[in-house]
Amino acid sequence: MAGRSVFDDFNSFVHMILGFVTGFATATYAAFIAPVIIAVYIAYETSEHEREVNRIGDFIEFIIGYIFGLSTSIPLFMVYR
């Protein structure tokens, strides 16, 4: 039986917060920084020496944060434009 590899440590929440910030930046005037954050995150994750399952879990955490950041920032950005 495989162990849980999503939200299993403190770094998991850091991945989600980084994804949230990136998603929020994508929908605002700071959209130029989002591709940079994504590229640095992918480079960091691929350079880490950990199991593939954990790496996939890290990307899932990032994507969850990204989607949450987009979903909260778009309505705010449209209202306060």
Image (cartoon, rainbow, N blue to C red):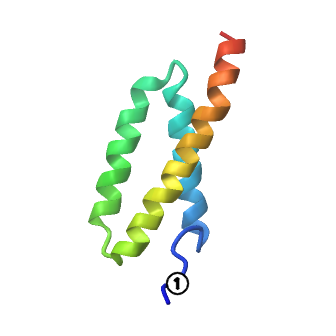
Q: Is residue 46 above or below residue 28?
A: below
Q: Determine whether, in the image, residue 55 is placed left or right of residue 10.
A: left
| Image x and y of residue 70, in percent | 58, 33
Residue drawn at the location 56% of the way across and 50% of the way down: 64
Q: How many marks?
A: 1
Q: Is residue 39 above or below residue 76?
A: below
> Quick one: label 1, few (<14), some, or many (20+) residues within 10 Å?
few
Which residue is label 1 attached to?
3
Q: Determine whether, in the image, residue 41 is placed left or right of residue 8.
A: left
Residue closest to the eye, 20 or 33: 20
> Which quadrant does the C terminus fall into?
top right
| Image x and y of residue 29, in percent | 51, 18
- Give the amino acid type for the residue marked by disc 1 in the picture: Gly
Residue closest to the eye, 5 or 19: 5
Q: Residue furthest top?
A: 81
Q: Residue furthest bottom?
A: 1
Q: Determine whether, in the image, residue 54 is placed left or right of residue 8.
A: left
Residue drawn at the location 51% of the way across and 74% of the way down: 5
Residue drawn at the location 50% of the way across and 52% of the way down: 62
Q: Quadrant of residue 78?
A: top right
Residue drawn at the location 57% of the way across and 48% of the way down: 65
Q: Quadrant of residue 11?
A: bottom right
Label 1, secondary structure: give it: loop
Q: Is residue 5 above or below residue 59?
A: below
| Image x and y of residue 75, in percent | 68, 22
Q: Is residue 38 above or below residue 56?
A: above
